Image (tube, coloured by chain):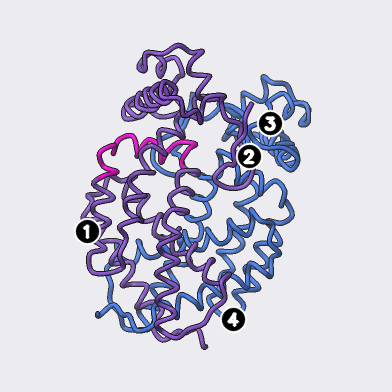
Chain colours: A purple, B blue
Amino acid sequence: MAYIASLRGRTVPIARRETSIDPRAIRTREALVSATIDLLAAQPANELSVTAIVRAAGVSRQVFYEHFTDRDAVVLAAGRAIFEPAYTEFITTFTPDTTYPEQVTKLFARMGEHGATVRTLLDSAAQGKLNHFAVDMLYGPIRAELEAHLKAANVDVGAGMMDDTAHFLAAGTQEVFARGLSEGTEPDEVARRIEDVRRTLGAFSMGESITD
Amino acid sequence: MAYIASLRGRTVPIARRETSIDPRAIRTREALVSATIDLLAAQPANELSVTAIVRAAGVSRQVFYEHFTDRDAVVLAAGRAIFEPAYTEFITTFTPDTTYPEQVTKLFARMGEHGATVRTLLDSAAQGKLNHFAVDMLYGPIRAELEAHLKAANVDVGAGMMDDTAHFLAAGTQEVFARGLSEGTEPDEVARRIEDVRRTLGAFSMGESITD
C-alpha cells in the first residue's frame, strides 16, 4: 500500500491507483468522484454505500478499491473536487480592494453549483479535512495582505507572529464561509456579511496597537 | 433507535443507553470512554477496534453496542470527555484582562493531561466535530466581550453582525489553540502566541473603523 502525506500531520494510506496519471485511471476516478458528488446531493455521507457508488459510476467493486481505500476516501475526494477549483480561483484572483465582495460572491456562486453536496459534506466526517484545506488555501493571500498592511503601517512583527495571525484570520474567514455554505445563504449575502465582519473588527481593535 | 440533535444541523442516531442516567449505565459508559482515551494515546482512531476497547474496558461487545452505535461514536465521546470540562472551566472563568495568558495556560495545562490523545483526536474523523464544539464554547464569552467593547467605543452594529464577528473571532482563536494542541506546544508558549495575535490584530486594524 502506498502512502501520501495527509493535509496535516500523519501520513494516510492511499489505494494503488489513487494517484495514477494513466488516462483510463483518471477517467475511472473522475466517474467515481462525479457519481459520489451526485449521490451526496441526496443523502448523508454515512448512509452512502460503495455499492451505490459503483452502480452509479458503472464500474466494479474491484476497480473501486484500486482507486480508493474506502467510502470515506472517495467522499473526501468528492469534496476536494468541489473545493479545490473554487478556492483556487478565489485566491489567485484575490485583491484586497473594493471588489472583494464581488470576489466572495463569485466563490459562493461556484460552490453553489453543488450546494446540496457541499451542505452534506460540511456535516460529514470529511468536514474537518475540507475546512483545513480551505483554511490552508486562504492562508497565503491573507498572510500577504497582512504583511503588506503592517509594512505600510510601519509595524514590525516577527514571522511567527505573522503566521499565527494569518492562520487566525484564515480560520475566522472560513468559519463565516462555512456557515454561509451550511445554511445555503445567497452569495451576495455572504459577501456582505464577511465585509461587515471586517468593518466590525476594525472598530473592535480601534485604539489598540502593537506598541501598547 | 433514538435520535438526538447533532452539534450542528442534522440529527444523528444514538445507541439505546447512550444517554441513560442509570448509575450502572454511567459507570459502564465511563469505563468505555476512559479505555478509549487511554488507547488513543498510543494509536490512531482509524486503527482502533471495538474489540480492543471492550477488552480494555472489561465489558462485552453487546454491552458496548448498548452504549455506542460504533467506534466513531465512542471516539467522539472520548474527545468530548476531555474538551468539555477544560473548555467549560476556561469560559466560565474567562476575564478579558491582563490575566488572559494565565487563563490560556491553565486551559492548555488541563488539555495537556491527555496530550497524546488530544493530538490523535485532532487528526481523526472526530476533529471537525470537536473543533465545532470548541468554537461554539468560545463563542459566548467572545461575543459578550465584543459587545461590551463596541458599546464602550459607542459603536452600534446589528446583532447579526455581532454574531458573525464573534464566530470569526472564536474560530480564529480555536485555530491557534488547535495548532498548539496538535504540535504539543507548551501551555505558556500558546498563551504568548494568542496574546501576540490579539496585539497584531490591533495593529492590522489601526486606522480602519466601522464608520469608514
Looking at the rendered structure, the kind of residue marked 1 is Glu
Of circles 2 and 4, the one toward us is: 2
How packed mark 2 is, by other alpha carbons closer than 10 Å (few <14, some 14-19, many 20 or more), is few
Residue position marked by numbered label 4 in the rendering: B98
| Residue A111, quarter of the rendered image | top left
Residue position marked by numbered label 1 in the rendering: A102
Kind of element beneath mark 1: helix
Q: Residue at x 74, y 43 (%)?
A: B41
Position in image of residue B71 (x %, y %): 62, 29
Kind of element beneath mark 2: strand
Extent of the magenta region: A110-127
Of circles 3 and 4, the one toward us is: 3
Horizontal side of A26 relative to A115 (left or right) equals right
**Label 2 chain ID:** A
Position in image of residue A123 (x %, y %): 42, 39
Sequence-wise, the earlier of marks 1 and 2 is 2
Distance of label 1 from label 2 (alpha carbons) = 38 Å
Q: Quadrant of the C terminus of chain B?
A: bottom left
Q: Residue at x 38, y 26 (%)?
A: A30
